[in-house]
Image: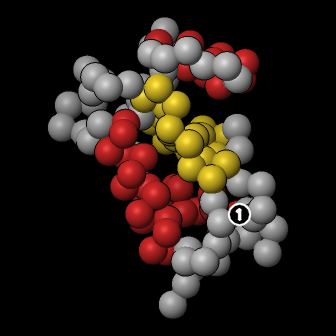
Amino acid sequence: MKNNNVVIEVYGADVICASCVNAPSAKDTHEWLEAAIGRKYPEQTINIEYIDIDSTIENARQNEIAEKVRNDEYFYPLVMINDEMIGEGHIQLKPVFNALEKFGFEAGN
């Protein structure tokens, strides 16, 4: 299994994206992804971070991505896995799971 260094980042803000009517908030999406991934890939470690685009962000790469979200280059919530954009706006599980399986994650029973 080669999934030791997989990082999922969920970018968003407290205010729901104006273009994402009826979509869950970025924080709700973060929590939903944590729960869904934990159920699908039990006993496999994964780091899921929530990055508030309206806060001070120390990491230069994360700050650059947050700036793109603030400038409407991406909708939020924006989901990145190891620097690859997986989804934006209304997030779906299938692309997230497909990306994780490319990194060696295996679905549990």
Q: Residue at x 49, y 9 (%)?
A: 71
Element under disc 1: helix
Q: Is residue 10 left or right of residue 1?
A: left
Residue wearing tag 1: 102
Is residue 68 among what the camera can see? Answer: no
Residue 52's x, y, as percent? 47, 26
Left-right relation of 49 to 22: right
**In the figure, is residue 6 to the left or right of 109?**
right
Would you place residue 73 above or below residue 44 in this image? above
What quarter of the picture does the N terminus occupy? Answer: bottom right
The structure residue drawn at horizontal position 42% and vertical position 65%, both measured from the top left corner, is: 36
Q: Judge by depth and name the residue closer to the eye, 45 or 93.
A: 45
What is the number of callouts on the image? 1
User: What x and y, as percent, mark residue 67?
Assistant: 56, 13
- Name the residue furthest right: 2
- Which residue sits furthest bottom? 109
Q: Residue at x 45, y 74 (%)?
A: 39
Nearer-the-camera pick, 70 or 30: 30
